Amino acid sequence: MNFNNVRIVLVEPSHPGNIGATARAMKTMGLQRLVLVNPAHFPHLEACARAAGALDVLDNAQIVNSFEAALIGCHWVFGCSARSRGVTATELDPRQAAAKIAEHSDLTEVALIFGRERCGLHNNETDQCNFLVHIPTNPAFASLNLAAAVQVLAYELRMQTHRAATTPSGNVLDLPAPADEMQRFYEHLEQVLLQLEFLNPSNPRHLMRRFRRLFNRAHPDRREINILRGILTAIQQKTDPPVGR
Ligand code: SAH
């Protein structure tokens, strides 16, 4: 995902407040490139007020006088529509769209387009989109406020970067501990519990199985298992008489 290659386009927004709220929605999620096609009122105090701290997004907004001008240089065009259009382009939900945008924006410019408050995008505009994006809603009341729709898409884009950042790093210590290490940990734990006489060998009451369930649910990594093993060893060293392993 390269946010520098993602532009948010508002087509003929009529309410300056929505432009400001869009800037805020974008900045909270890390987006900064706003393009406005023939805004009815801009710049405007109401836009600044609703932008809160996102005035830089407004200041850097690019104003163009046609839909086509907003798309110059874009290889991928995603149009957000409150109505399901069916025929013109493949329809995606926001999560699917965000995954595609994450992929394409690494290499090329991508536009994410939002329509007019009153009537959305015109057919000749959706015809220029590679994909249409529809936020699932109550079918009897499907239309979100413009800036709210921007927020949903911006959030999904953010989640894509978040997912990428939290996928396992490739460091073996971050991986869940392998089964044989888990097995050695359970044996060690059992040994210490017996030693402490917490576990009664003649009446174990499924205690070890319960511990397995508890630790398996937490899928500890190798570092964590090493810490637990270290604690068990420390207990053994303090126990009288000390029992070496
Ligand atoms: N009355 C218009 C809705 C306009 S809402 C219509 O029927 O099309 C303004 C813009 O917000 C829409 O053009 C679209 O880009 C976005 N939007 C609102 N609700 C949406 C939804 N459920 N899914 C996708 N985009 C939506």
Image (cartoon, rainbow, N blue to C red):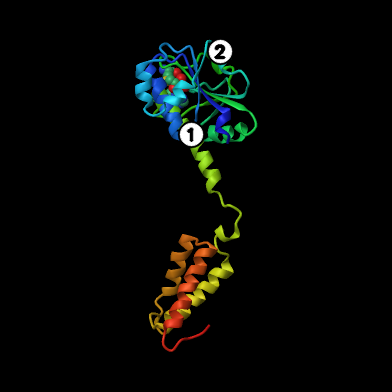
Q: Residue at x 39, y 76 (%)?
A: 205
Marks 2 and 1, the one that precedes in the sequence: 1
Q: Amino acid at mark 1?
A: Gly
Is the C-beta of the residue carrying label 2 under 8 Å from the nearest atom of ligand 1? no
| 226 left or right of 53 in image | right
Give the image quadrant in which the ligand numbered 1 is located: top left
C-alpha separation, residue under disc 2 versus residue under disc 1: 30 Å
Q: Which residue is mark 1?
A: 30
Residue 115 coordinates in the image, percent (x, y): 47, 18
Image position, residue 5 (x, y; %): 58, 29
Residue 124's disc number: 2
Circle on res. 224: none
Q: Secondary structure at mark 1?
A: loop
Say if residue 54 shows up in the picture.
yes
* Mark 2 surroundings within 10 Å by alpha-carbon count, few (fewer than 14), some (14 through 19), many (20 or more): few
The percent position of residue 76, horizontal first and vertical second, equals 61, 25
Q: Nearer the viewer, residue 139 or 186?
A: 186
Badge 1: how crowded within 10 Å, few (<14), some, or many (20+)?
some
Determine whether 191 is above or below 8 in the image: below
Count of labels in the image: 2
